Amino acid sequence: MLGTYLPIILLLLIAVAFGLGSVVVSSLVGQKKLSPVKLAPYECGCEPVGSAQERFSIKFYLIAMLFILFDIEAVFLYPWAILYKKLGLFGLIEMGVFIVILFVGYIYVWKKGALEWE
């Protein structure tokens, strides 16, 4: 039974060895000439403004998570559109249920005030 998992275990070992080997070789071979310019935070070529440890409002993270959630759900529309003719009426009803659930979630988030940026 363990023989069936041998290719997966071997792949994981190779991936871990490659990752660790890359880090070790890079640290041994790479140059270590630190300067104030290299240690400065990078902001698109502009002079850094403020601290790099600045705190963000929880609203920022909430909006980001909601964007990812609704964006991922919108991605499910593409395969459905490709297979629409093969799925027929059943596929249409399934996608209708999916859109209704998505819309109910959107209304809930909107009513809770999670989309309002202050």
Image (spheres, rainbow, N blue to C red):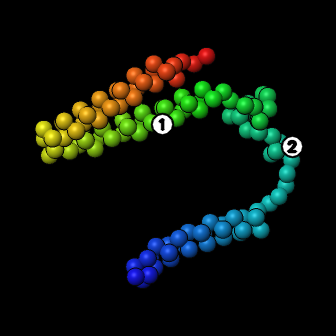
Picture residue at 45% right of the left edge, 36% below the top:
69
Q: Can residue 68 be seen in this view?
A: yes
Q: Tag 1's secondary structure?
A: helix
Q: The N terminus is located in which quarter?
A: bottom left
Badge 2: how crowded within 10 Å, few (<14), some, or many (20+)? Answer: few
Chain-order first, disc 2 or disc 1: 2
For label 1, the residue is 68
In which quarter of the view is residue 37 placed? Answer: top right
**Identity of the amino acid at label 1?**
Ile
Left or right: where 37 falls relative to 111:
right
> For mark 2, what is the residue?
36
Q: Which residue is pictured at 34% across the width and 26% down the height?
A: 103
Q: Answer yes or no: is residue 48 visible.
A: no
Q: Is mark 2 on a helix, strand or loop?
A: helix
Task: Left or right? Give the position of 62 relative to 8.
Answer: right
Q: Tell me: residue 80, above or below residue 23.
A: above
Q: Count every numbered label the image shows and give the total.
A: 2
> On the rendered structure, is 94 left or right of 71?
left
Residue at 71% from the left image edge and 69% from the top image edge: 25
Which quadrant would residue 63 be assigned to in this image?
top right
The percent position of residue 64, horizontal first and vertical second, equals: 54, 32
Give how far across and how far down residue 118 sits, in percent.
61, 16
Mark 2 or 1: in front is 1
Q: What residue type is labelled 2?
A: Pro
Image height check: is 114 above or below 24? above
Classify residue 72 by image quadrant: top left
| Left or right: 16 in relation to 11 | right
